[in-house]
Amino acid sequence: MSQGQGMAQEPALQGLETQELIERSPQRLFVLKEADTFLVADIYGDVTGAADGLFVNDTRLLSTFRLRYGGRRPSLLSGGVSQDNVFFAAHMTNQPLPPLGDAATPEGVMHVERERLLWCGRIFERISLFNYGRAPVKAPLTIHFGADFRDMFEVRGQQRSQRGIAQPAVVEERTARLSYEGLDKVLRTVSIAFSEMPVRLDESQAEFFVEVLQRTPWVLYIEVGPSPAMAPGRARHRQAAASARRSMRLRQRRGARIYSSARLFQHWMDKSRADLALLTTELPTGPYPYAGIPWFSTPFGRDAIITALQTLWLDTSLAHGVLSFLAHNQAKQTSTFRDSEPGKIMHETRKGEMAAVDELPFAKYYGGVDTTPLFVMLAGAYAVRMGGASEIDAYWPALNSAAQWIERSSGGNPEGFLTYARGESSGLANQGWKDSDDSVFHEDGSSPEGPIALIEVQGYAWRAYLTMAELAGMRGEADAAAHWKSRADALRRAVEQHFWLDDLEFYALALDGTGRPCRVRSSNVGHLLYCGLPSPKRAQAVIRQLLTGAFDSGWGIRTLPPEAARYNPMSYHNGSVWPHDVVLCASGMARYGERDGIVHLMSGMFEAATFFGMRLPELFCGFKREAGEAPVAYPVACLPQAWSAGSVFMLLQATLGLHIDTARMTVHVRQPRLPHDIDRLQVRHMKVGDQLVDLSFQRVAQRVVAFIENQRGSRKVHLSVDY
């Protein structure tokens, strides 16, 4: 993830009561997303102006949105997001109200329901009051609202020397409109509209004082968005709800479906699929998974590629959309500010004010050394999955340009390693997936001088060269195929010679600008296994170590073992557990024949998910697992996160030992395993060429058998199983 000037801590929650602070832990914040709009609020549905709010195109439009009943926050009964991620609902009840010229309203007679969704860039909210008492209740209801129009990077803690100008509020009978003109000369506006007439409405609150008869509902509809709305009401709310649910249902139905005999494991898969659907945005180039909420709800290159790789065996549409978008946004020019060079693949893009006026380089930023080879890797995997090189004809010019950038960029290193060094101080200091400032270091904890060659990046580059050789060969370009194969062979020899540490039986984290190895064991080497570069003997030595307690926390593989000089289980990259990192390690182990270790890692990930609402966060702390204790949350992790949501599917593919060879219409299964406590698993409607296949795995005695239950189409699919 891009950190800009480092990962910002969540701003102080000014003005909140102690109990509110406790209840605003990361696991009790709830997210809705639609296209380029997302909303983060607490379990009551309130927005406080901390790290929450309504965000549109990297700008926070709504920074305050609180419901108060009788001047107090109602008592919470329950709150959460629906299984399909379309609706948020909070159920509350009144606290005792003071007398209003009559008897006081007792506690717990008024049901306060708050339901909302996002559609067409707007919040559609319905607040219902239902009186279960024996007498009419005079209900004083207040909605507090505000808009700070802060850029996403300001919300994350970035300081600015100058901001734009807040415009005077426009208040009408049932609508308040707040505006701000940024330094980019763009007028940003948010309108808050109500279906009922407030007794008082100004630029910061709407007050209602209604009499709710016994056993009778009173309903208020609210719409919040960047443009004025027609009058909110029941019909508009119902229409938006139906459209939002239909859109989400279509996204969730893409690709094959998985059914497990274990209900809780099924819940994890279903929630992961729902999170991927939530994060996937329909762009003109096709579906694209935004990285994560709240900090990274935008197109990222690395994250989207890995997410597409995780789900490719089930759904090819995501890979197509990712390849199309990244090819379309491939760099054409050199810019040290944006770390761009012709052929390079985009790291991230932003649409906020600070990016627009070049306060930060992230409008289109290319400072990721690994994104370009990963792009080539995804194209190769997509071609295999689809059945031939013709499937990537549209991307061939972009692939050639990307491979030439890898070759050209590696040319400055005497061993041909792909290295990085930022062009200007505004860019990322570290440009691999561990891109925080302190994530690359020597054995003694000192920072290396660049340009830096990361171990996993060499694996990506090697696999990219090999992919280009294979694709060129399929296309009949023999000379190009021979060239790329030669580059791959040379790079593999160089990695084995210069990164391998005989005394540690491990690969170095990186080489610095002088060629000196960073003698640090790290999970990065698992990505090298995923690419398939190490010799079998060295791979086995690495796998053994990754499965020991030094790396394995019991919940998953830590990024660093405790021996490392900068190890800190509470850090962003130096000792934490990242689900996507764990599953890349597991997939790498599967490539070299490891089976039991993968099932163990699957169990750890699944059990961690049960403590996070059946969804894995971006990362969590790397403390050792203790009996009876939950994994420790990382305080500002994104949740949901695309490559964490996709992790279960890549991990399951590795556990099943499944590979699809569409060109030969064959599904290969190698030494299949099932997760613990699962006796049967089905993959339905898996597309192989023009055939739809239902594939089953079943535990029989001491082994797992695989068989095709059903298939539909014109060309028969064959199953090859190696037990």
Image (cartoon, rainbow, N blue to C red):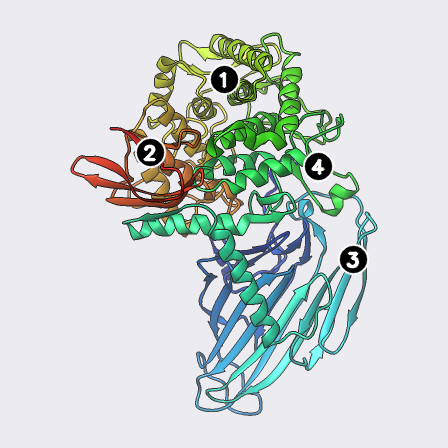
- For image coordinates 52% across by 18% down, the residue present is 466
* Residue, disc 4: 364
Mark closest to the chain's N terminus, 3 or 1: 3
Disc 4 is placed on an element classified as strand
Is label 1 or label 2 in front? Answer: 2
Choose top left, top right, bottom left or bottom right for residue 239: bottom right
Q: Amino acid at mark 3?
A: Tyr
Question: Of 512 and 535, which appears nearest the observer?
Answer: 535
Q: Amino acid at mark 1?
A: Glu
Question: Of 409 and 258, which appears nearest the observer?
Answer: 258
* Residue, disc 1: 443
Disc 2 is placed on an element classified as strand
Q: Amino acid at mark 4?
A: Lys
* Residue, disc 2: 718
* Residue, disc 3: 180
Viewport quadrant of the C terminus: top left
- Callout 3–callout 2 Cβ contact below 8 Å: no
- Callout 4–callout 3 Cβ contact below 8 Å: no
Q: CA distance from mark 4 to mark 3?
A: 24 Å
Image height check: is 676 above or below 461? below
